[in-house]
Amino acid sequence: MGLHWRNRNYVGTHFGGSLYSMIDPFLMLMFLKNLGRDYVVWDKAATIRFKTPGRGTVFARFRLTEDDIKAVRVAVERDVRAQPTFTVAITNSRGQLAAEEEKVLSIKKKAVA
């Protein structure tokens, strides 16, 4: 995400809400796509920790492994609901950590009608 007047705060760095919003939907969408229509996926909680001022363009990389998907399927079968936690780093163009966001999801199977 580039730094523009729309997402710049009073001191000229990325607004914290913009940093959060660039991450918000992706883990939920990734699980929805990978688990299929039999599952319900919601965001449960999020925490963002600011490390250095976000200046210039910032980046986030999302990674969901087969092991992550398998662990959720196993947890749902065992416990009815899985609540996996993921940490996503937001870095600048030099690779410096600007913020870390921790996301907790809530995943269960859809109720049979």
Image (cartoon, rainbow, N blue to C red):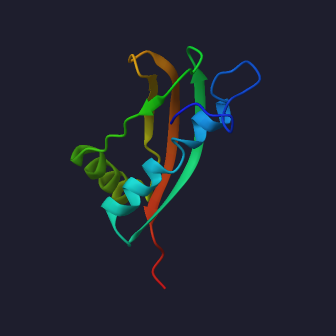
Residue 88 showing in the rendered view = no
Q: Is residue 104 above or below residue 33?
A: above
Find the residue positioned furthest to the bottom: 113
Using residue 9 as the reference point, say whether residue 72 is left or right of it: left
Find the residue positioned furthest to the left: 66
Q: Which of the 4 quarters of the picture holds residue 59?
A: top left
Q: Which of the 4 quarters of the picture holds residue 50?
A: top right
Residue 94: give x, y in percent of width and height: 39, 16
Task: Tell me what residue is drawn at x 34 percent, y 68 percent.
Answer: 36
Residue 15: give x, y in percent of width and height: 67, 30
Q: How many marks?
A: 0
Residue 20 showing in the rendered view = yes
Q: Is residue 92 above or below residue 6?
A: above
Find the residue positioned furthest to the right: 10
Task: Tell me what residue is drawn at x 49 percent, y 85 percent.
Answer: 113
Residue 73: give x, y in percent of width and height: 31, 56
Task: Tell me what residue is drawn at x 57 percent, y 21 percent.
Answer: 54
